[in-house]
Image (cartoon, helix red, strand yellow):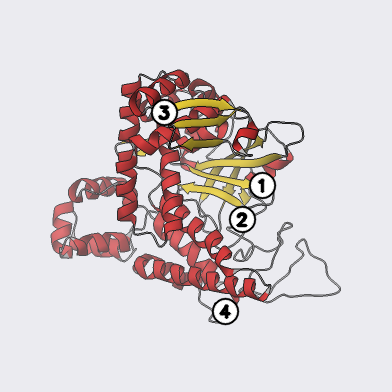
Amino acid sequence: MARKTLLGNKIRRLREQANLTQARMAEQLGISASYLNLIEHDQRPVTVALLLKLGKQFDVELTDLSDDDDRKLATGLREVFADGTLAAQGIAPEEIKALAEAAPNAAKAILELYRAYRLARDDAQSMTLGLPSGNTRKMVLPAEEARDFFHDRTNYFSDIEEAAEAVVAQAGVPIGEAWRGLVDYAKARFSIAVEIVEPAALAGGVRRYDTKTKTLQLSETLPRASRRFHLAYQIGLFAARKQVDLIVATAKLASKETETLVRVGLYNYFAGAVLMPYAPYLAAARERRYDIELLANHFGVSFEQACHRLSTLQRPGDKGVPLWLVRVDIAGNVSKRFSAAGFHFSRFGGSCPRWIVHEAFTSPGRILTQAARLPDGATFFCVARTVAKTGGGYLEPQSLLAVGIGCEIANAHELVYADGIDLEKLGHVVDIGVGCRVCERENCRQRAYPPLQHRLDIDVNVKGASAYAFKK
């Protein structure tokens, strides 16, 4: 299942950035110039020993040399070129792959142009339907840009980690019992009083901070894990403000709405880091083999909070298993996605119905697993479970969401959920796609749409497994 490590374009760009000739770089790596030339043209794979030399000699993280970024770009480009306005150009997958590898900045520019086009098209459709286009813009672009911000940084922020560690040390917060320590710290350090109030006092909300009285009000409907999290978030607004301001200022985000969403995400990150400090949490994860429920119980957090924190354990030199994380609702809408594992999320459409994250809704509360293979051959081990969010009373509607995490199949042995599964000879791998609009797999019984780049092949006398037969 291992893929050959062909990183020619990345190594060539690294050499050019260092202003080295092939001969000079080859000399530093202890290989011949002809062998380096073959590597740069993807005629030879890069060995583990050579990767280690590259990392040490040129002071780069090995993850920076992986092909995950190129694969993610290629997946996004496939979605773009599958659009009806571009499909007629007949751009082959090999051309898309070459563009992503040889000119990644140009590929990113194409993705941004297409996103702007989609936004303009949505605005035009909203105007046709008599809807205010400004609302569409606010709902679509800032949220996507904020998700990309976290995704592109593998959801790890060292400055926020340090700020959280300082608060944990100053407050003397014990693992799993953070409430009292955080309440006392908030009062002593920032003069913040905490009140647990009835839902009516918050007009349907769950948290409100009064800047005049310096009082944080939390709804009594919140579970204890959520109360701790919201309190840690509020502390972060004061304790991590400088760090958050600096990150946002250097991010060059497109709008104030995006900046606000990123700020909220960073303060949420801070809260998770306070309740689940990096080193203790990583040690506990390794000891418990990433058993999410055991981690949630030990640290006094929710299942989703425990999953989210696992996706952030990417400290250089002390990383956990690279995990992706996604949260979807019962309609398939993605409200949270992060990837430190190279998983390709759809940027412009829905996800694959064969993915275990959607199946989780058929078995609420149960943990489901799946070995899933993407069209490019990358295989992932996936874990999914539903989480319920309630308004607190019988008459309040309950929201059911599915949370999924996963890693490349090579790392699955570190997760307790893979026990009993022969990872070398997987008996059943589910072929999934990024989305029906770009998936070229035939005879899929759950296909919702035909691929945009192919015409339908309809025969009134034939009924196949899929509702949409198409010509390749």
Compared across the picture, whether 249 is left or right of 295 comes to left
Q: CA distance from mark 4 to mark 3?
A: 55 Å
Report x, y in % for residue 425. Answer: 56, 41
State the residue position of label 1. Answer: 358
Report x, y in % for residue 162. Answer: 30, 34
Compared across the picture, whether 417 is left or right of 339 comes to right
Which mark sits nearer the N-terminus, 2 or 4? 4
Mark 1 residue type: His
Identity of the residue furthest to the front in this view = 212
State the residue position of label 4. Answer: 85
Q: Nearer the viewer, mark 4 or mark 3?
A: 3
Residue found 52% across the figure and 42% down from its top: 406
Q: Nearer the viewer, mark 1 or mark 3?
A: 3
Q: CA distance from mark 4 to mark 1?
A: 30 Å
Residue found 28% across the figure and 63% down from its top: 40
Classed neighbour count for the residue bearing mark 3: other residues with Cα under 10 Å, few (<14), some (14–19), many (≥20): many
Report x, y in % for residue 29. Answer: 18, 52
State the residue position of label 3. Answer: 192
Q: Which quarter of the figure is the C terminus placed in?
A: bottom right
Q: CA distance from mark 1 to mark 3?
A: 41 Å
| Residue 22 visible to the viewer | yes
Q: CA distance from mark 2 to mark 1?
A: 9 Å
Which mark sits nearer the N-terminus, 1 or 3? 3
Which mark sits nearer the N-terminus, 4 or 1? 4
Q: Does dot 4 land on a helix, a strand or a loop?
A: helix
Identity of the residue furthest to the right in this view = 461
State the residue position of label 2. Answer: 351
